[in-house]
Image (tube, rainbow, N blue to C red):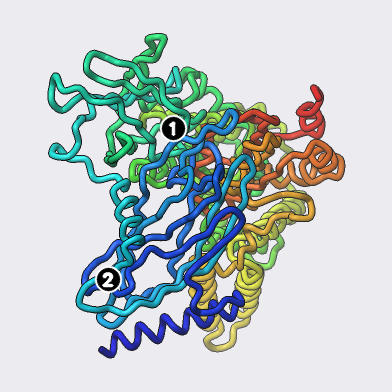
Amino acid sequence: MLLSIFNRTVFLASVLLMACWSGLSAAQETASGDHVKVRWLVPDTFGPGAETIGFYFEVDPGWHVYWRNAGDSGAAPRFDFAGATGEVGPIQWPFPVRLPIEHLTNLGYEGDVAYLFEVTPDAAAMDIVVNLEWLVCKVDCIPGYGIMTLSRPVGEAASWQPQDLQLRDRFLAMVPAEATAENFPWQVAAVAASPQAGTLQFELAPREAGVELSTPDVFPLDGGLLTAKAPEVAQAGENIRYTFERVPGAPMPPSTGFVVSDGERAWQLDDQEIQAGAASAAGAMGSATEPASTQPLWLLILAAIAGGAILNLMPCVFPVLSIKLFSLAGHDGQAAHRVKEGLRYAAGVLVTFTALGALLLVLRAGGSAIGWGFQLQSAPVVLGLILLFWVMALSFSGLYEFGHHLMNVAGRSRGGSFATGVLAVFVAAPCTGPFMGAALGAATLLPAYSAMAIFLGLGIGLALPFVLLCVFPALLNRLPAPGPWMETLRQALAFPLYATVIWLLWVLGRLVGESGWLIGAMLMLVIVFAFWLGRHAFLGSRWLAWGLVLAALVASFSAANRLQEQGAANGSVQQQEAAAGWQPYDRNAIAQALASGQAVFIDYTAAWCITCQVNKKLVLDTAEVADLFRENDVYLVRADWTNQDPEITRALGELGRNSVPVYAWYPAGERTPVLLPQILQVSMIKDLFSEK
């Protein structure tokens, strides 16, 4: 009884707060918008057990709302239950129909429909408050929003209005049932992919031979894998074969699902394993694990080596290599020692690439959507790099002698070259240079051994220039002899490290909001104060310094992690340059723009991606390019991947990529994107409109 009273109190409080915010009354049992009216399908009195209720959408003639997989455009409705005194189950979707609109196909409902939920009231009453969002379309689409509340008593049995119960039962009969041998007249004969033809075949066989069955409709559950267009249907003996078109660039999952309907009933088939080797119309055979790219593996490995070598020229790698450059300047002339240093550095690079590659593959096997540079999507990792580069820079500036401690790790000690190789890979990940994008994208789709070969190719390319310097003395001999100039060089090399710290502080701010700057700056201040304190020989000064450092580390790392987990950035990562016309990534909004015939340009970017920021400042955010986009009515999207975003990761995977930058251009009237080079020029943007 006390629990029931508590639930009612919480519910009424939530209704009151929402009513104050929205200006609605607490008894809002209906919602409406352009061409749509929504009301409850519920009993007047609930019984003590579970009951199926619904939201009844009355839609104007010629307009429609959407199924769970909305198809080529549109969006499924959303029901956000802000409060309920009982239990509310997942949404139950009646089976849809295909809705051709010009060259597109949507999946939804012509006319009225009820979206259903199973609820279980508590002992006293059934109270619900829910936020609704929907999209109603004819050719144009109109979004709608509403807040609906419900309050009904609980009696000995449910009591319905006959008309509402009839409507509820009508749509409940359209909800797909789980397919079993007892209720499903067909059985799945095959689900097989043909990557070369870009199709997937789904074949049904009668469960009983010789029984005539009508050809059912089949709807894919995964709109990111298969298009909503009606499949080609062919008879194969008694079997029925459906050939679906795949979404261009979509990665092939191990399984997918379908809804099968005979027009009166429907059955849901989940987790149907996708087999390799479906024959295309041209008789092509393929593997479900093949990448979208048909490039041979050796060519992808060469691209990986070239991309790794180019990383040495990227500004995010230079601060690390500058440490080794400084140590090489004072080499002792022993060829064997130089070769060992080069091999240790190469080993550090290759081991780290192998570890990161293995981690990516393990996460991929576990179903996670993750991409290259993922470590810099973690606030604690970024804070750790800030600390490391800050300490190195202070040493180079002469604040304290770093040579006998961490400098030995990153510079001249036996394991120093190996550690430098590890660090070089870690900070090189944000820089996706030319040739790297295609290689990394293929690595996310290839079998494990082929993917690891690509990661090793990247490592070979990154390590190769340094190894060549060590193996060929003539190259090293061009360096000047040791002397007083080395102290000047050391101090000069501190400034790239300071610049890296500033950049990483900005990245941290993008990850956790404005507090990121404060956390990072306060940690740096404490570290400098601890160094100063440790140099004063009063009693306990060193212990006090170490205590301050430990306390600062615990406080700053825990704060950074907590802020990122709680999303305390207040949406700062998603705040786009609205004044310049850029919109945040929204798959439905992009689909609507494409459906209306508007050109779309998507900038897949991240704060920690140096190449991305350079392209923005020199090309995308210039007045000349902004004018070009505005004059040609381009829908601009900035897909910010600074924080790990599964939707953006999925979109990159559909393009055959798992790193940024990526620039996708959809010309007006086209649904297949053109991918621009990773290093942009203004002339490239002009060329997009040269044919107009």
Please say whether residue 458 is visible from this viewpoint.
no
* Residue assigned mark 2: 159
Image quadrant assignment for residue 315: top right
Residue 226's tag is 1
Q: Position of residue 208 (x, y in %)?
A: 13, 25
Q: What residue appears at the point 47 percent right and 32 percent down from the top-left corner?
A: 227
356 w.r.t. 465: above or below: below
500 w.r.t. 366: above or below: below
Circle 2 Cα neighbour tier, 10 Å, few/some/many (<14 / 14–19 / ≥20): some
How many numbered discs, if any?
2
Q: Earlier in the sequence, mark 1 or mark 2?
A: 2
Q: Nearer the viewer, residue 448 or 616?
A: 616
**Kind of residue at disc 1:** Leu
Image quadrant assignment for residue 525: bottom right
Image quadrant assignment for residue 264: top left
The single residue placed furthest to the front in the displayed view is 162
**Kind of residue at disc 2:** Ser
Q: Nearer the viewer, residue 294 or 498?
A: 294
